[in-house]
Structure formats: structure tokens, C-alpha cells
Amino acid sequence: MGRQDIVAEIPRLRRYARALTGDAARADDLVQDTLERALGKWALWRPGNLRAWLFSIMHNLFVNQTRVAGTVDFPGDAALAEIPVRDSQADALELRDLAGSLARLPAEQREVLLLVGLEDLSYEDAAKILGLPLGTVMSRLSRGRQRLRSLLSGAETGAPHLKVVR
Amino acid sequence: MNKTPISEQELHAYADGRLEAARRAQVEAWLDDRPELRQAVAEWRIQNERLHGAFDPVLGEAVPARLMAAARPSPALPLRMAAAVAWLTIGGLLGFLLRGQLSPAPAASASLPRQAALAHAVFSPEVRHPVEVGAAEAAHLVAWLSKRLGAELKPPQLAEQGFELVGGRLLSGEAGPVAQFMYQDGRGQRLTLYVRRDAQTAAETSFRYAQEDGIGVFYWLDGRFGYALSGEINKPELLRVATAVYRQLNP
């Protein structure tokens, strides 16, 4: 294992960070902080599972940042809804819809849902990354999926409204 | 009727495709009597698919330079980094100053093996999503990638060299769309062919070889296209396949 393995993980770290923060620039900042932190520790310790190790560094940074920023950890609907969408762009609409719903999940549920559903990590690895018992991870996954279901189906009030431009 | 209790954790494992076949069948049967749960499981699966649909394109984006730099500030590498940056800058300046007067800037062909090797390193270990469109849908694959690159694009047949087409995917390169075809041999060894169309003017180069972090890359420019064949196999073997690729692209 060498540094090139870290480079090979960058696209995955970016994918996760993009989904987690909902903001491309903020996501890349998070990835950059993660890489710098990882390189700093690299000299002292070589992890057994590189991917899980990098994701756990990112998790800790994300948690610290959201703690500092207070409860607002996502641009949320206000930012999302301002972006005009052409009504023919069904994909863009669906993306905005999904991103808006993800934004409404509590960060702790969003993290589990993305590690499992998007990053295809095992439940055990997700628990390791988040520093939680497996049971807690599973109950967060369960609550997150139920909540996302109702958000996507529009059952919850205040679901993101999209400004459609014709 | 099966009486084994099914835990909620197992329902999620079922939705995520992580159960052994035997247990999967039991959960399957158990869900027959519980249409509401079956519906929930189906929607969890759709959530996973939508997440991949929405965010997988990030995997294909060119990695910003500041992140590449952040991943390699080791004391052993600055020289190489500095050299690469200088080369790119000079290439970029030359290209800017002499645009229209010179053949494609050296920078274009310099970054080709690097980008190709990175794309190889990212996607070749993938088990679940190695390609976007599999070889089974060959016609769709060819039509789709040809349309996006704006030119007819046929993946070479490499059966004679021992490699079968796994499929392909679309990536975003520095100057436009890039197609990546993946091949695999009987031992699971994978090669990727990276094809980009970015040159403003036609150019032709001979085969060039580069080693990028343990990945061997043969690359060449032909017309407005840049090609790169990447793999973690020895140089003569890779050259043999690269030659076959070249011959098929230039019959």
C-alpha cells in the first residue's frame, strides 16, 4: 500500500462528501482537509483498511465542522430552491428533489444512509467509521430510510419546492 | 410457511443484497404475506439506485489539482511535482502564446497517461459498478459513447489477446467527455482503454510508455483522439495488447 492508493480513493471521497454536504466546493474542502490529515498521520501509522480509515477521518472532520457551525450544516432548501430548473430537465429535477430530501435528514442518519446505500460499505465498516455499535448504525439506517421515503413521496410538509422555469 | 423470525437488520441486508442465497429465499417467502414491508424494501432499493444515479457522476469528474497536491506532499516527491507543474505551465504558456501555430500543446499528451492511470486505478478494482453499461448491451454502449464523443467509436475485440470486454463508462476529462472501456482476462486481470477527443488540431504520435504509480500506460495521439491503454501487467504484454488495439482502430 502506498500513497497512490490514497490518490485512488479521492473520487470516492469526493462522491461521499458531495452527497453529505450538498455543496461541491464545501465537499472538496472537506476532502482536502481529510487528505491533509491522513498524510499527516500516514508517517506514524499505516491503516489496515485504507478506505474505512479515510472515511473515518472525514467523518470526524465533518462532525467537528457541523458542531462549530451549529445546527446549520447544509445549504438546505433555501439555497437549492433558488436555482432555476428547466422543466424539461427531469434528471436535474430528480437530483434536486433527492438532494433536498437528503438535506432534511439529520446528519447522523444521512451519514449512515450514504455509507451503506451509496458507498456500498458493510454495516460493520460503517459502524467502525462512525465509532458506533452495530445496533445503533442499523437503527439509524432504518430511521433514515423511512424518513427519506416520506420526504421523497412528499408526505412530509415543507418538502422542497422547486421553482420551475419555462 | 417459514416461521424463522426475520429481524429488521436482515430486511435491510436483504434490500442491500447482502444475504446468503438460502436466507434470501426465506426472507422472500416471508415478505409474500407482508405487502407493506415488501413495498418498503422496494423503496429502499430505489433510494440506493437514485443515490448512485445522482452522485456516481462525481467519480468520473477530473480530480481538482489542489486535491491531487494534497495527497502527495511527501518530501520524496516535490521535485517530481515541481517538474510536472513546470512542464504543464510551460506547455500551457506555449500553447497559449502559439495557439493555432503549433501542433497540440505538449501538456495535452503529458497529462493523458496520468488521467488514464487515475481512471484505471479508480474503476478497475470495482466489484459492483466496474462499468456503467455492460458488454451485454454492446450496441447501446457503442451508440451512447459514440454520441457523447461525437464520433463513431468501436471498442476493439481483444479475445485473441485473452481479454474480453466488460463494458464501458463515460468520464469527464479536462477538455470534454472521455470514454473508458474495460477488459478482463480469465484470471480477473483488468485493462482499461481510455479514449478522449480533445485536440483542436489533428496530430499523430508514436506509442509512448509511462509508469504512473505502478500502472503501466501505453498512449498515443491519432487524429483528434488521444488513446491510453492502462494495466498492471508487464510492459511487453501490455505492448502486445496496445498493438492489437492500434491495428483495429486503424485497419
Image (cartoon, coloured by chain):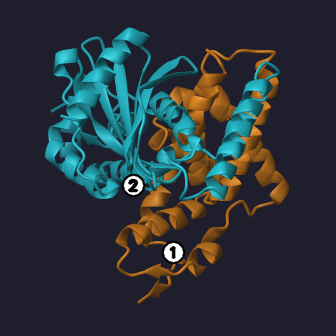
Q: Quadrant of the C terminus of chain B?
A: top left
The image shows residue A95 at horizontal and vertical percentages of 45, 64
Hue of chain B? Answer: cyan
Packing grade of label 2 (10 A; few <14, some 14-19, many >=20) is: some
Q: In the figure, is residue A163 to the left or right of B127?
A: right
Q: CA distance from mark 1 to mark 2?
A: 18 Å
Same chain for the residues under marks 1 and 2 in the image = no
In the rendered picture, chain A carries what hue? orange
| Callout 2 secondary element | helix
Q: Nearer the viewer, residue B211 or A21?
A: B211
Residue B232 position in % (x across, y down): 44, 16
- Where residue B140 appears, as percent x and y from the top left, is 18, 50
Q: Is residue A140 visible?
A: no
Q: What kind of element bears circle 1?
A: loop
Q: Is B38 located above or below residue A43 in the figure?
A: below
- Amino acid type shown at disc 2: Arg
Q: Which label belongs to residue B76?
A: none
Eyeballing the image, is A161 above or below B226? Answer: below
Q: Which residue is mark 1?
A: A159
Q: Nearer the viewer, residue B189 or A99?
A: B189
> According to the image, label 2 marks what residue?
B50
